[in-house]
Image (cartoon, helix red, strand yellow):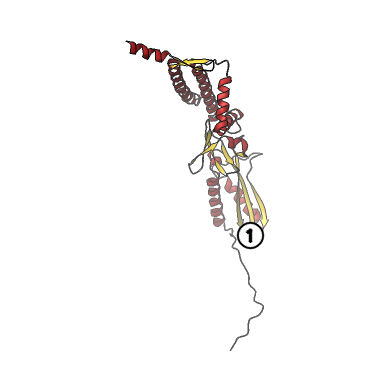
């Protein structure tokens, strides 16, 4: 009987931390509330992603932003409730702030920086889920798949998922190819031999572009055009500029290769000569025959 009373007293005994006192039950309930909150936050995020994705007036990036902000909000409320169950006065966050400052001072600077950068990305929306981006410092190109607490997942054309710290999107230069629209202009260089009928070539190439898939219909801002870029030593150099849209924007190199194949085949079919570098050697005098 005495041993049972001692066990109960141990469970009910309190430990002081400054002006705050907590016991085993408080720690237990705090841990359970934290686990429950994490479960609720995850379930709520998945539910919002599933339900809001069906809304016709919301794009993928907006749905992801709403779900992520709700997730963070539930986590913050859960943490405050857990501190309250421990016995901390949540109206006075001096202790919490002090603990965080100590943690940051001992090596959490990068985590804090990436977390804040992730929130900035969600609110600023200069880089969104579904955007096709390029990090100029590293040359990384790909589609933004997720913006998480510490990092952003970028999927490349080779189906590789690259984990990029969120702070790089704030400190580095980022080229967002689809920020304001999903249109992209491709530059396709090619060359023909000297003596080519340039007017006929222009007509043939621009006519060919109308058969390309994913090309934006011609309008005042998105017309295909053919630039005459140079009269070189052994060739006439041109560059086709054509606007593409949709999935072609995310596979620009593959689409550019497809168009180059088509131009090359058209040149052969219509008799346009492809230039071959030529060197003429003139021998001014022959050496005298010896012997």
Name the residue: 55% across, 42% down: 141
The quadrant where residue 168 appears: top right
Q: Position of residue 65 (x, y in %)?
A: 55, 27
Between 171 and 185, which is closer to the camera in this rendering?
171
**Dot 1: few (<14), some (14–19), or many (≥20) neighbours within 10 Å?**
many
Is residue 109 depicted above or below 78 in this figure?
below
**Front-most of 275 and 126?**
126
Asked whether residue 178 appears in the rendered view, the answer is no
Name the element at disc 1.
loop
Of the pair 252 and 207, the residue shown nearer to us? 252
Q: Nearer the viewer, residue 159 or 105?
A: 105
Q: Residue at x 58, y 46 (%)?
A: 209
Name the image quarter holding the N terminus: top left
Q: How many numbered dots are placed on residues in this image? A: 1
Residue at the image position 65 percent from the left and 55 percent from the top: 198
> Which corner quadrant holds the C terminus?
bottom right
Q: Determine the residue located farthest toward the bottom in the rendered image.
A: 291
Q: Is residue 256 above or below residue 9?
A: below
């Amino acid at each position: 009987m005495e041993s049972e009373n001692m066990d109960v007293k141990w469970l009910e005994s309190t430990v002081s931390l400054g002006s705050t006192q907590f016991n085993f039950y408080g720690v237990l309930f705090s841990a359970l509330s934290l686990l429950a909150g994490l479960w609720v936050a995850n379930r709520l995020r998945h539910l919002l992603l599933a339900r809001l994705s069906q809304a016709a007036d919301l794009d993928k990036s907006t749905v992801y932003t709403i779900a992520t902000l709700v997730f963070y909000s539930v986590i913050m409320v859960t943490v405050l409730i857990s501190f309250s169950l421990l016995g901390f006065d949540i109206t006075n966050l001096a202790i919490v702030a002090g603990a965080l400052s100590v943690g940051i001072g001992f090596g959490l600077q990068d985590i804090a920086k990436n977390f804040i950068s992730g929130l900035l990305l969600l609110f600023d929306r200069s880089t969104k889920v579904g955007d096709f981006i390029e990090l100029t410092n590293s040359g990384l190109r790909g589609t933004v798949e997720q913006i998480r607490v510490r990092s952003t997942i970028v999927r490349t054309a080779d189906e590789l998922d690259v984990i990029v710290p969120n702070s790089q999107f704030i400190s580095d230069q980022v080229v967002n190819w689809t920020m304001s629209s999903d249109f992209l202009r491709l530059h396709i260089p090619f060359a023909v031999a000297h003596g080519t009928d340039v007017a006929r070539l222009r007509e043939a190439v621009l006519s060919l572009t109308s058969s390309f898939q994913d090309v934006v219909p011609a309008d005042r801002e998105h017309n295909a055009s053919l630039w005459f870029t140079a009269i070189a030593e052994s060739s006439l150099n041109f560059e086709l500029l054509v606007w593409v849209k949709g999935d072609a924007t995310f596979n620009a190199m593959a689409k550019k290769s497809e168009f180059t194949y088509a131009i090359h085949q058209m040149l052969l079919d219509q008799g346009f000569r492809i230039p071959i570098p030529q060197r003429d050697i003139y021998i001014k005098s022959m050496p005298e025959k010896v012997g």
